[in-house]
Image (spheres, rainbow, N blue to C red):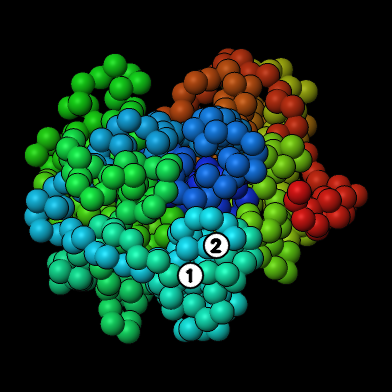
Amino acid sequence: MAPNPPVNSHRHLITSAIPYINGIKHLGNLVGSQLPADLYARYMRARGHEVMFICATDEHGTPAELAAAKAGKPVAEYCAEMHEVQAEIARGFRLSFDHFGRSSSARNHALTQHFAGKLADNGLIEEVSEKQVYSIDDGRYLPDRYIEGTCPNCGYDRARGDQCENCTKQLDPTDLINPRSAISGSTRLEVRETKHLYLKQRSLRAKLEAWIDSKHDWPILTTSIAKKWLNDGEGLQDRGITRDLNWGVPVKRGDQPWPGMEGKVFYVWFDAPIEYIAGTAEWADAHGLPDSAWQRWWRTDMGADDVTYTQFMGKDNVPFHTLSFPATIMGSGEPWKLVDYIKSFNYLNYDGGQFSTSQGRGVFMDQALEVLPADYWRWWLLSHAPENADSEFTWENFQTAANKDLADVLGNFVSRITKFCRSKFGEAVPDGGTMGDSETALINDLTARIRTYEGFMEAMEIRKAAAELRAIWGLGNEYLQAAAPWTVFKTDPEQAAAQTRLALNLIRLYAVLSAPFIPDASASTLEALGTDDASWPDDVAAALTALPVGHAYTTPEVLFRKITDEEREDWQTRFSGIRS
């Protein structure tokens, strides 16, 4: 594949689908949005671009209320605590958000109410009297996702009232066969009348379709899901954007009351994507900056025309980001920035089954960090990202990738050359010798592969980028194997010095190239080398002279230790059951 041309824009707005507040996420959630978004953000920063990387916790809706009740805490207190838990875990995985916000923020309240008001002003909101499911045993209206039953489309018996996660079809609770309360399991449900606001998405269908059709470079997964929702059955439907709940953004028309909507809140899926904008405003507030500082990222009349906006998400979130959120932005009639590229992911499965937050199945983010440092997980997850199909986590595969790629290829190269240099020349870059044909060939091979790696990173082809990076590491080992400075040293120490000098500089090069994938190992390597020069190798030959003769370094500790069979078997047993 010919690498893509360099990205034109120098300003990149990057958002990850915002994780729900009720509990700690599993590795499938991590690789489906936050981690690849972080990889891309780190890469773009390394290439000198200005980046705004935003994520947040998604805090409204019934699951938050129920999780808080289960924990015996007021919902606001529960959300504040869980936000900090999720933020701490994100830091543990080295997710480099510019801001990790909260959808319950004052900024998101105001912006959500603002958008609703603008949509109403433009005739895109309709008040609808509808029949809603009320659970007699639970004593409450049941939001769509808290009604379960059999999907009329595919027969999946745990479909939710808003969407079947098996076939992704959008549903209404009344579509379900044999419906029951997901809270109590009760089938004593009755339909009662209530009034709600609907976003008239159907009237925006042609505009949305033209916009989606203009995105020729989007992944097939993204466009196929969007078009399915646009065209299947009766096509795109108007969507209820309010709920009968206590916790959420109170329904207002801008900053004014909305008669008849007292006591209602906006639907979580209406306010959650607006938090991308609100989170950027929270970032500005946190840094004492004026509104213009965040508006230049989001409003095309304030400078956002030169921003490239990329969203990362799992495939189950695609309909809301290709249709509902764009409908909100377009329908406002205001000059808001629309997404340029949506990188969507399939599912990561776990050891012959599925990861499941609700069922506690698989490895969760906090547990993963207790087992091994973040870089091990980052490398495996990204190099096995479920881009074109679902992928599967197995402990055998994880052990193999960590031991072969990280320990044998990268770690071994760093260890061999630093220890050899220390024993023969001391802990400083040695002088002497000149570059020969094999060094020139290495530079040419590296240059070609690095340009290809850049192309994959810019195209967000994550597995291909990881494979290319692994091959770049391999070139160093092949060079060392062929050059054999430990043998050359016996007859020509000057030449061995030149080979060693090149290899030490190659370690720095690897640290720079690898930083988006394995930031901790990269940072510790640069620290051991005694340099903070993380400049990107646009000129590979020049990059391989960055550490000058006499530059002092310290021989690093083992970069990546190997995972033993005993450890693997222990973890396999430990994570085979259900998380309590």
Residue 60's x, y, as percent? 44, 44
Q: SS of the residue at dot 1? A: strand
Q: Is residue 102 visible in the rendered structure shown here?
A: yes
* Disc 1 target residue: 190
In the displayed structure, 525 sits above or below 403; it is above
- How packed mark 1 is, by other alpha carbons closer than 10 Å (few <14, some 14-19, many 20 or more), is few
In the displayed structure, 419 sits above or below 459; it is above
Tag 2 and tag 1, C-beta contact below 8 Å: yes
380 and 122: which is toward the camera: 122
The amino acid sitting under disc 1 is Glu
Q: Is residue 286 left or right of residue 465?
A: left
| The N terminus - image quarter | bottom left
Residue 530's x, y, as percent? 58, 18
- How packed mark 2 is, by other alpha carbons closer than 10 Å (few <14, some 14-19, many 20 or more), is some
Q: Is residue 554 left or right of residue 572?
A: left
- Residue 366 sits in which quadrant? top right
Residue sitting at 42 percent across and 43 percent down?
A: 246
277 and 8: which is toward the camera: 277
